[in-house]
Image (cartoon, helix red, strand yellow):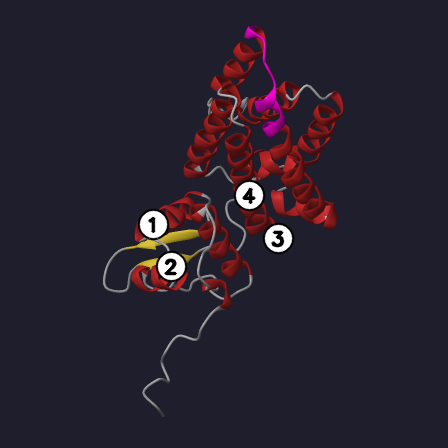
Amino acid sequence: MTGNANRRPAMPMWRPVRGGNAFEITVSRLVQAIKLGLVAVGERLPAERELAERLQVSRVTLREAIGALREAGYLESRRGRSGGTFVVSPTGAAPAGGGPDAGELARAMGEALHDALDFRRVLEPGAAELAATRTLSAADRQHLVACLTASRDRSPESRRVNDSRLHLAIAAASGSPSLAAAVADVQLSLDKLLAAIPVITRNLDHSDAQHARIVHAILAGDPGAARAAMEEHCDATAELLRGLLT
């Protein structure tokens, strides 16, 4: 037996994180590893330092991702000599109210889920960019700001509705009825999924910050910044959805 016999085998999900949404990508990688059985229920994640090095993320980002998955019911942290972070569920916490969980909804959508995410990634950044080229009326500007403020409400009853209203307001600000109608369609196609995924506080913080950058860029008349911020926002949402639901 060689000295490498007890070395943990390389896991494909632990490849380095690339892109601007390190938190969301790290959450996605951890969930995919759990769902694929690379770390089974009852098993411990690799040590924090080792995992951060493999993923090439900061230990702060890794801790935030692990904390989010504790909050969502995937992981549990234990103290003591045999402590660490352990997998407790391959699916996370059960949905409140006994309705269908996000995984069931995603499976029902099949390839339509990936199509909707891809379509949104092309559509909504273009809407934000176009809105930033328009000369908006005072009423339009006030409406965008009011929708942005409402979208920060974390109450479960209104969070998703207010989020969708902000995206629809951005699309309407583009001045293109066809574009606004298309954004409404894609928002509707993803609404139940977005409402069903586990609430991850850090992700909501990121979403709020991204929303603010999008609106501020539109109001400042900066099309490039508006597109880039919306692309980052769509990518973060897609990363979480694909990680948590597939």
Q: Name the secondary structure under disc 3.
A: loop
Q: Of callouts 1 and 2, which one flags the residue occurring earlier in the amino acid sequence?
A: 2
144 up-or-down from 226: above or below: above
Q: Of callouts 4 and 2, which one flags the residue occurring earlier in the amino acid sequence?
A: 2
Q: Of callouts 1 and 4, which one flags the residue occurring earlier in the amino acid sequence?
A: 1
Q: Position of residue 230 (x, y in %)?
A: 55, 34
Q: Name the secondary structure under disc 1.
A: helix
- Nearer to me, 15 or 11: 15
Q: Give the labeled residue for mark 1.
A: 63
Q: Give the labeled residue for mark 4.
A: 235
Horizontal side of residue 8 vs 234, given as left or right = left
- Mark closer to the observer (3, 4): 4
Q: Position of residue 90 (x, y in %)?
A: 52, 56
Instruction: Report, in whole angstroms, how far the alpha carbon at label 3 lies from the one at label 2.
Output: 24 Å
Q: Give the labeled residue for mark 3.
A: 246
Q: Name the secondary structure under disc 4.
A: helix
168 up-or-down from 44: above or below: above
Three-letter amino acid code at disc 2?
Gln
Three-letter amino acid code at disc 3?
Thr
Which segment did they paint magenta?
128-138
- Nearer to me, 173 or 42: 173
